[in-house]
Image (tube, rainbow, N blue to C red):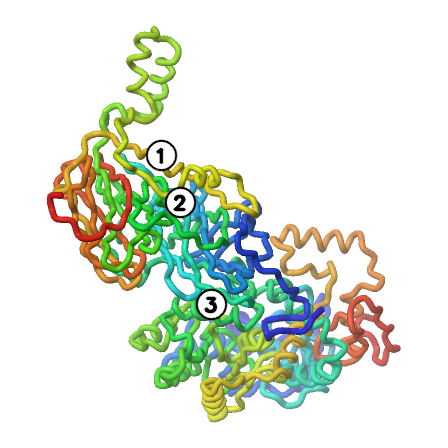
Amino acid sequence: MLVDHQLATEGREELRLSVAGHELPRPRRIPRITPAELDLNTVATLCRLELVPRLEEGWAQDPAYLDRRRRGAVLSAIYDHLFGSGDAVAFVTSHVDYDQWGLGVLAAQRAGVPVINPQSTGSLKAYTLFPETARGEVTFRAELTRQIGAAFERDVWAQRHRLRERAELVAWRAKGNFGRPSWWRAGARATLELSNATERRQLRAHAAARFGLDPDRPTVAVFNHAVSDALWTNREIFANLADWFEQTVAFASVTRHVNWLLLDHPSQIRYDRTNFFGNLAERYADQPHMVFRPSATISKNLLWSLVDLGVTVRGSVSNEMPAYGIPVIQAGWSEWSDCGLSLVASDQTDYWRLLDDAIDTLLAGRPVITPEQVERARLWLWFYRSATDVTSALVPHWDVWPAPYLLRTLRVHMAQVESDGEPVFSAVERMWRERAPFLTRYPLRHVAANDRIAHPSEAAHAYPSILV
Amino acid sequence: MRTRQSWFDTLFDDPVDGLAVSSVVSSGRDPALRMVDGFVRGIAVVGRCAATPTLLAFKVAARGQPIRVRVWVRFDWTAVKWWSERVVGGSVAGGRRARLLLVRSQGRLRHAFVLSRQRHGTTEKVARACITFDLAADEVPDDGLVIVELLDPTDVALPAPVAAGLVRQPTVGLQVDHVEIATPDEGPAPGTAVGWGACPDLGVATWGDLLLDDTGRNRAGVIVINPDRVPGLVAGTRATVSLTVRRPPRPGLRSLPKRALRRIRREVGRRLPDKVRAVLRPLVRRRPAQPAPPPAPATAPSPARALVLRLPPTPASAVPTLPAPTTAPPSPPSAVSASALSASGVSLVSGRPLTVEVRPGPEETIDLVVADELDGPALLCVELVRAKRRHGYGFQVVRVAASPAPVAVGH
């Protein structure tokens, strides 16, 4: 409404904002959004709204684009006013992409306001970017990738001997699809029941027969992303997700000495109305070494038995497959891409080199993945599903669903449970005090070898609490 | 905790003892059922298929011995409902159609079967079958699995009526009652004809009625045979399936609405004088009176074996409660002649069309002789070509046998 009003008055009226009856003071000057940032954000927003992987030629003169860009500029100015006033403690946002959230994140970063991005993939997870910890990466997510990587190295990998049993337990539960994040595969085809190489070899023959592939050749699986999903919100080495997939498929078509399994994203129908994947499948239908399928039609058991190398931009297979010994190449960054569990290409040249090298190594019968990568991947599973997942009925687990159950759980907790020692409060306080990039269930540096040993109490507060 | 064996293993995976040879898995909770795919585990049964293909994998401690795998599969009313819920979202009409399935194990096609709940005309339904195949000693490594995969025959060009009359995603809903891991025995002597009741039980053959359209009038029959289960079927011999094709004797009374028929039965039971009841009772019985059964219907299992087969499931014995192999098939009168029948066939392994000769057999039966040597499970399709009301007829497999040489026409 505010944006519409500003557009109607064409900026003649001075922007006035009040929060809870308190009018925000005129903001101090903060750098305005750059035209390039606004362009990028507008294109990503339009792609998502139109369900297309990329805009058509001449998009810069398209009235729809220009209109959206004008709205973006106004929205960005409002965010500037909000965060530039000096009263904002933090920007808490469920999303960090597209214009309605993404412009706020950019404004908060320019204004030096911490950005907290809670996620509901388990109980309560949140990533936070404190302005003083920024390293000049291109986006909010890219900053976090760096910081998560550093924290993982310091607090997790350095303590791997103490954490091994915990990580193995999470890896064991993940095989049975327990502890899964909200968007993970579910149902009768989502468990991993393989336990040794003989079983994998036997199942592989069945999987290859289903697709008409030669089981004795290495198989590379390329996981297409939801093509209009949050473009460029982390570092990507191709122009867009569709370009990456098209070029990889073209590479596959001439790399005939291995099998290629091209898999579409399970939720693609909500992200693409151009039949991007179907058109590619049709174009390469005469290639017997390439199989195009929706990924949800293949069970995890079959996939894990057939695939020798995974390829993705930022998909979760790049942390899940390495935990069970299958190497993955990433053509972009993700939350875990700095944690040393996958092969992350730095640019396009590096990407093709990584692909060539991995295929040559597989053809030579040598392992592509290292034991260290497998261990790091299992530690990531623990880190993501356990250590950084704060459990409290104040934020019920996503699986406490549908809404009436979830709200009743919350109501009972708020009415009947005293807030002393509330895990959410202490976790947020600890993150704020330590300027840590994520919430943790307990202080990671003091984690004992297993749950049966009590955690040492925390050190004295070094920073004032966010909650006072 | 223990040492990790591979990257799929974790420190919390406990080793599982394999099934001993001669044991039965009768619950989906059996730890030897190591892997299920597109399948929902059961408690008192192994479980039910939820997707096509379906895959089950068992840990078996064969210890260098060959094994026989037997899997009992049931096509019940719940299977129809599951199919309609999961495949077409509500309509049960398609879910009743016949299901044709291939069985792959250890990477190779081993068996095929068809299940049908249709009972039009005089065709007996086969709604329960026993998948039976043998694995050589080197095919069952102790650290490996015995894999049973149920598949849709998507790569085979089926005869047109069969392609039209089958259901897609055919495993969905089928129940796996139990699975037996046994020692291969020699079975019936080579050349023995296997009678109709024993065919599904021994994995020799299964059959069913195909609805070719929604009217129910246009129908064909489908028969699936497994040559490795036919006693004595080796190079130089031919598979022969003997049928009867008949029209039901009292279509008028049989086609009465069920409610009216029930009322008549009640009247017959309560009010009428004994003499009248005695006259009417044969006419309103649920199944028409049976004339003399066709000759030599069954053979293979001895009476002693039949007795064993009726035992309830225990880990030590196998369990089918199928019709006794010696039961005579229903065979109403009005048989049609061989000249009214056409038959075609296809190999379910290679997709190769098979030549099927139709010959008059003894005692009003018709012999389908597969002129080609079989390379694995094969499908035969039969259709009436000279009958005005095809929906009134049904076919009944009487026996399956290996015949030493092609028999001259007119035999």
Amino acid carrying label 3: it is: Asp
Q: Chain of mark 3?
A: B
Q: Which residue is mark 2?
A: B201
Amino acid carrying label 1: it is: Thr
Density class for disc 2 (Cα within 10 Å; few <14, some 14-19, many ≥20) is: many
Density class for disc 1 (Cα within 10 Å; few <14, some 14-19, many ≥20) is: some
What whole-number distance in Å separates the C-alpha atoms at marks 2 and 1? 13 Å
Residue A26 showing in the rendered view = no
In front here: B301 or B102?
B301
What whole-number distance in Å separates the C-alpha atoms at marks 3 and 2? 27 Å
Quadrant of the image containing the N terminus of chain B: bottom right
| Same chain shared by disc 3 and disc 2 | yes
Dot label at residue B327? 1
Report which quarter residue A391 is drawn in.
Answer: bottom right
Instruction: Tell me residue A249's x, y (percent).
Output: 39, 81
In front here: A117 or B207?
B207
- Identify which residue is drawn at 30% across, 53% down: B232
Dot label at residue B138? 3
